[in-house]
Image (spheres, rainbow, N blue to C red):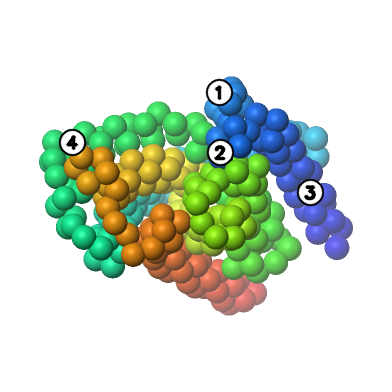
């Protein structure tokens, strides 16, 4: 009971420190369209979860053991490879779904991304380079969510519940931006609540994927890499599939909000579900091994 009390205290302190500056800056500098008017506030936002971890560990005298700051266990290379490949495959699969089921007229070859091979490769390379350049921001979030919050919640509840709750907390952390149209725009029914629901769903399944990468390597770096590459590649490459070569949008069978959800979410949900199953199997195997040893 005493250990659980300490865990609850540390978790609460971490969440206050991670949320408070983001909500203050998010509302103070919002442009009311889903972005921030202050560049410093925008550039620093993703670093606050890591800052919250450092302060929490120092204040509670927890120390920095089990911080997932090593580069990984033996044979971690394949997980780094997965963290790199997944963000590249995601927009390609999403673009295919978009043109198979949602675009009314025109083919994938008419899209801005597919119409010019050199331009497509350039866009992809720039997105990858941008993702690597922004890796510190990804580390800022992953050191907090996957490196600290999920393990703390696992001390209080089963792993699946911890992963899901982390996803919800992570999604709502974006609240000040979501309230004004971040990620999903403003032109849809049930705004902005639909955006909150969509972000929660997305973050839950991505939470499973990123937790799986962290646990399999015992490092936050693969998750940070995957996180930032998803942010940069998905935005740039997928939007290239969503418009024609001349930059005008295709005609969709639904509005842009549902176009994005129906195109992008299937792979996120499938991959997240698979990772959740793998996490549960790993947990069960570890418990059985512990029972056998006892």
Which residue is painted at 60% across and 53% down in the image?
Answer: 192
Number of the front mark, 4 or 2: 2
How packed mark 1 is, by other alpha carbons closer than 10 Å (few <14, some 14-19, many 20 or more), is: few
- In the image: residue 107, left or right of residue 7: left
Residue in view at x 85 percent, y 63 percent: 1
- Compared to 27, does 74 lie above or below? below
**Residue 241 visible at all:** yes
Q: Which residue is mark 2?
A: 33
Label located before the other in sequence (3 or 4): 3
Check disc 3 and report its element: helix, strand or loop: helix
Name the spot of residue 120 as percent of width and height, x first: 19, 40
State the mark number for residue 39.
Answer: 1
The residue depicted at 61 percent of the width and 37 percent of the height is 32
Label 1 vs 2, first from the N-terminus: 2
Question: According to the image, label 4 marks what residue?
Answer: 119
**Residue corresponding to mark 3:** 12
Q: CA distance from mark 3 to mark 4?
A: 47 Å
- Mark 1 or 3, nearer chain start: 3
Q: Is residue 71 left or right of residue 142?
A: left
Q: Position of residue 193 (x, y in %)?
A: 62, 57
Discs 1, 2 touching: Cβ within 8 Å: no
Q: Could you tell me how far apart the alpha carbons at marks 3 and 2 are, in whole angstroms?
A: 30 Å
Separation (CA) of disc 4 from disc 1:
29 Å
State the SS at label 1: helix
State the CA–CA distance, disc 1 to disc 2.
15 Å
Mark nearer the viewer, 1 or 2: 2
């Amino acid at each position: 009971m005493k250990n659980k009390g300490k865990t609850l205290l540390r978790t609460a302190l971490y969440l206050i420190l991670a949320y408070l500056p983001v909500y203050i800056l998010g509302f103070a500098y919002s442009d009311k369209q889903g972005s921030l008017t202050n560049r410093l506030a925008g550039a620093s936002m993703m670093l606050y979860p890591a800052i919250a971890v450092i302060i929490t560990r120092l204040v509670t005298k927890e120390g920095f053991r089990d911080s997932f700051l090593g580069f990984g266990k033996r044979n971690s290379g394949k997980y780094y490879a997965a963290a790199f490949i997944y963000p590249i495959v995601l927009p390609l699969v999403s673009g295919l779904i978009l043109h198979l089921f949602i675009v009314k007229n025109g083919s994938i070859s008419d899209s801005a991304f597919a119409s010019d091979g050199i331009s497509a490769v350039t866009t992809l390379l720039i997105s990858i380079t941008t993702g690597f350049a922004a890796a510190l921001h990804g580390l800022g979030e992953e050191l907090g969510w996957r490196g600290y919050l999920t393990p703390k919640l696992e001390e209080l509840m089963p792993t699946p519940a911890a992963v899901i709750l982390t996803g919800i907390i992570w999604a709502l952390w974006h609240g000040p931006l979501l309230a004004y149209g971040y990620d999903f725009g403003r032109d849809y029914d049930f705004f902005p609540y639909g955006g909150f629901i969509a972000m929660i769903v997305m973050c839950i399944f991505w939470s499973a994927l990123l937790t799986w990468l962290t646990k399999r390597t015992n490092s936050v770096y693969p998750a940070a890499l995957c996180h930032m590459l998803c942010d940069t590649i998905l935005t740039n490459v997928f939007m290239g599939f969503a418009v024609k070569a001349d930059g005008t949008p295709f005609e969709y069978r639904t509005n842009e909000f549902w176009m994005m959800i129906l195109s992008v979410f299937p792979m996120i949900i499938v991959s997240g579900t698979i990772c959740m199953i793998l996490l549960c199997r790993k947990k069960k195997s570890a418990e059985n091994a512990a029972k056998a040893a006892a």
